[in-house]
Amino acid sequence: MTRLARVGNVLNVADDAELAERLAARTLELVDVPSESRDEAALAAHVLRVLDSGGVAVRDAGDTCVVAECGAAEGPLVVLAGHFDTVPAQGNRPGRRDADAVHGLGATDMKAALAVMIETGLLLRDAGKRLSLCFFGREELGIADSALSPLLARDAQLSGADLALVMEPTDNALQGGCLGNVNATWTFTGRSGHSARPWLADNAITHAAAGVEALHAVPVERMQFDGLEFAEVASVTMIAGGIAENVIPDRVTCHVNYRYAPGRSAADAEARIRALCDQPHATLEIDSNAPSGAVAVGHPLVRELIAAGGLPVAPKQAWTPVAEFALAGVPAVNFGPGDPAYAHRRDEHVRVDALVRSARTLEAFLCSSCAKPWRAG
């Protein structure tokens, strides 16, 4: 096969057709293995078997984690990281494919990326960089449940990596950093009473409506960090209340989700959302706080990746495991083939040409000094 060199080279169509077939078939294969959060064991075992049978040095790292080693024996260590789990099915498994795309649960987030990781491990022969493939579970449940942070705590090699590429959906852009994510319970209280005599009661729904409207009116706050602009937003995502059809309720609870930019500390984020939710008859309890992830787009290896693929650079307007790697001291960025606009949707899909572009970009980045980076067949 002809190796993709630096930006501007023309790809060999026949070579790309073969690679496209491998990547599409692998993605569909992974889509059809159920792996909703907390049910990733079958997919972890499948990936372990595929890599092991292909001659890749791979191991069961425990707790739904699989780690493989390939690439150079020396040089900087790059980690490709991806999660096994998906959100619940929406009638979109088994998957299907057509000439342009692979469709099905997790195709975008993030079985397309897992397919690229696997095929990179199977096809990569020579590389100028050491490479670890890091697969893990329970990412969709949040940082408190993620299997990645405990893995980084017990694996000195992964936590000592020079760079982690978290292969979350970015549509093959380089996305720096990630938003912090606060979840909180906002409780409004009043006094219950008969609905025929509401003046004798104090309606908690009325208080909640005023509070929700006030929070909705808060403008999006734009924050610059290392040249990228992030949007800080707070939203009510769930609301519950009521006792009976003829009773004025004395309690309403809302779920508040607050996303904050890199550069804002976790403590400052909690103070900020408390201030935004400071309303009469209300209390706020912080349920979880996943910190933001640092922007590492200026890192030399990241600049090399950007150049290798001619990648556009943007902020990551979501939380990702970039934050977990950052907490472990590993610079990390987001790069993956899935289009984030289709993540978690019933019509989730990934374009086959996006799979090829992702794999070729990694090839150029990992193998810029190699004569024959891909194994035949």
Image (tube, grey):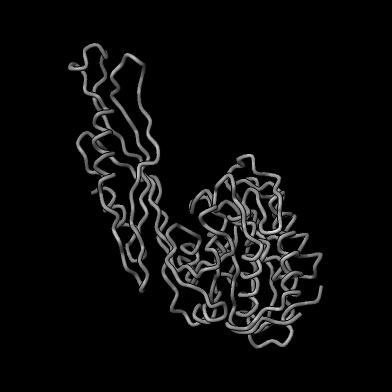
The N terminus - image quarter? bottom right
x and y percent of residue 281 in the render? 22, 33
Q: Residue furthest top?
A: 196
Q: Residue at x 70, y 75 (%)?
A: 70
Q: Residue at x 51, y 66 (%)?
A: 334
- Quadrant in the rendering for residue 102: bottom right
The C terminus - image quarter? bottom right
Q: Nearer the viewer, residue 101 or 111?
A: 101
Q: Residue at x 55, y 69 (%)?
A: 165
x and y percent of residue 273 in the render? 29, 50
Q: Nearer the viewer, residue 350 or 138?
A: 350
How many marks are shown on the rendered structure?
A: 0
- Quadrant in the rendering for residue 207: top left
- Quadrant in the rendering for residue 356: bottom right
Q: Residue furthest left?
A: 199
Residue 360 vs residue 185: left or right?
right
As drawn, 287 above or below 198: below
Q: Residue at x 38, y 50 (%)?
A: 182
As drawn, 249 above or below 59: above
x and y percent of residue 305 in the render? 54, 78
Residue 355 vs residue 152: left or right?
right
As drawn, 324 above or below 193: below
Residue 51 vs residue 341: left or right?
right
Q: Nearer the viewer, residue 143 or 174?
A: 174
x and y percent of residue 31 in the render? 68, 51
Q: Nearer the viewer, residue 153 or 227?
A: 227
